[in-house]
Image (spheres, rainbow, N blue to C red):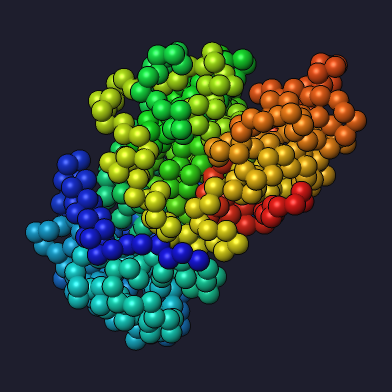
Amino acid sequence: MHIPFLSRTIWAASTAAILIFAVACGSSPEPPSLPTEEELSPPPPAQPAPQQPVNTPTPRPTLSESSEEEPTVVPTAVSIRGYDSVLPMSKIFQGISSTVFNEFSPNPALAIDGMETARNHGDKSMVPVIVSLMRFINRQEVFEKAVLTLNELTGEDFGDTPAAWPLWFEWVGANLDDYPPPDGYPQLKRRFLASIHPGFEQFLLGYEDTSRIEPFEIEWGGVAPDGIPPLEFPPNIPAEDADYLESHERVFGVSINGEHRAYPLRIMNPHEMANDVLGGEPISLAYCTLCGAGIAYSGKFDGIETTFGTSGFLYRSNKIMYDRETLSLWNQELGQPVIGTLADSGIQLDFFPTLLTTWGEWKGAHPDTTVLSLDTGVYQPGRYFPEDNPNATYYEYFHTPGTMFPVWIRDDRLEDKDVVLGVNVGDAQKAYPVHVLQVERVVNDTLGETNVVVLASEISQAAIAYERGDNEFARLEDDTSTGVAMKLVDQSGHVWNVTEEALVNAADSSETLPRIPTHSSFWFGWFAFYPDTELYEGGGG
């Protein structure tokens, strides 16, 4: 398992960024007041997350003013002998908040006092509270007491540097049943995160009643809402005019109703979202750079047509997006609302097959394609560096093995950032490592009760899947191409054409086998949400 990296520089920078956001957005220098008795009433338990197709992000609480006096809260009792964990929790939140948001009257002693009280009472419920705030601690004395408290309450030791935070986060994620936070934790975390940027408040109001994922796992990604600006109906140009693109550069290729478009990753990396219309359909190409997943979602659901933006929150290092119509938060990997008005709606976004390929392969298969113009209207064209340029967005991240944020559900059968094709049929999921597909090129397989065939390029990361019925497919004997096969032959010698929508029998066009919508992802990103997934290991099964 790779350990996520978080250097002291990154740790310090995140704290500085918080202060910049707070000041720039006009937030009050005073941390928010402590929660009332009613606000600290127990929230409903979080519903199970990402295993079943029920995934979602959660909001968080914020703290109170920095005062030498003990906060006046009416706690919800959680322990015996009159001790109440809400009071030390409130002190910890308030003390750390004061050092982050109130440079004129910080009160780190309040957080230290809350930690000492928790240690004296052996209060294990403070473990997720402290770990949630650990990355924001900007005082050495507070950080040392946080580490001491965690060590004593758990018996674990991950070191005394900022690099300990992701290790603690992953450990708590895996052991949260044994270390549940106190009642009132979601409200305090919500207030804290809303203090980072006032725009977060609109996403989190009432989330205690709507969140379908564990509040502990919701993380701030380091940016404001739409701080990574989405592309809004970006200009596109014919393929022959795209002289800025080299044939080896990666693109997301999407085809809808006979219209084809390429979304170069050199443009998508700095934006992560493109709201567009293709083939007459409104779509949102939601791209999580951290987990390598680009998915073209339909912009229509339940009679609503909308666009999507980037919330600034993460869940298992996966971006949480929001819809502009209801401001509900959505899990990007699953296309499901997780917090807000739509959280209990059961809505599942439809999505279109998204092909991760190269510009040369996509243009060769779709000569009439359009492609995004460098003149996006957001950044200057020179800002969009090719992915292999060290100045390119996420260049360092893509060239290092670890994740940027902690993810506690992992599997070491593949490297974290190995690219896989994720196939989801009914209740069954399977991941096909691209490096295996590049060798085998055509894979006849069965997933659940569905027979599938997966086709892949020898050179690029392109891979697509179709239902295959009772057929066994292979490439034509004289096929010397290196891209995804354009024709297949079945066990009876019948030739089939490979189209965007289906496999079509060349001798009888009425006989078709539908394409299965898929997308590519880093292995860790797929496994975090489909831990029961099968993994294709080669050899046709």
Residue 343: image quadrant is: top right
Residue closest to the eye, 1 or 302: 1
Q: Is residue 44 left or right of residue 389?
A: right
Q: Is residue 67 visible?
A: no
Q: Position of residue 309 (x, y in %)?
A: 41, 33
The residue at the point 60 percent across, 46 percent down is 434
Residue closest to the eye, 97 or 431: 431
Q: Residue furthest left?
A: 104
The residue at the point 48 percent across, 44 percent down is 292
Residue closest to the eye, 220 or 533: 533
The residue at the point 75 percent across, 52 percent down is 539
Q: How many marks?
A: 0
Q: Position of residue 449 (x, y in %)?
A: 82, 44
Q: Position of residue 357 (x, y in %)?
A: 53, 33
Q: Is residue 174 visible?
A: yes
Residue closest to the eye, 135 or 484: 484
Q: Is residue 378 left or right of residue 511?
A: left
Q: Position of residue 217 (x, y in %)?
A: 46, 58
Depicted 196 relative to depicted 471: above or below = below
Q: Is residue 181 left or right of residue 409?
A: left
The residue at the point 27 percent across, 78 percent down is 145
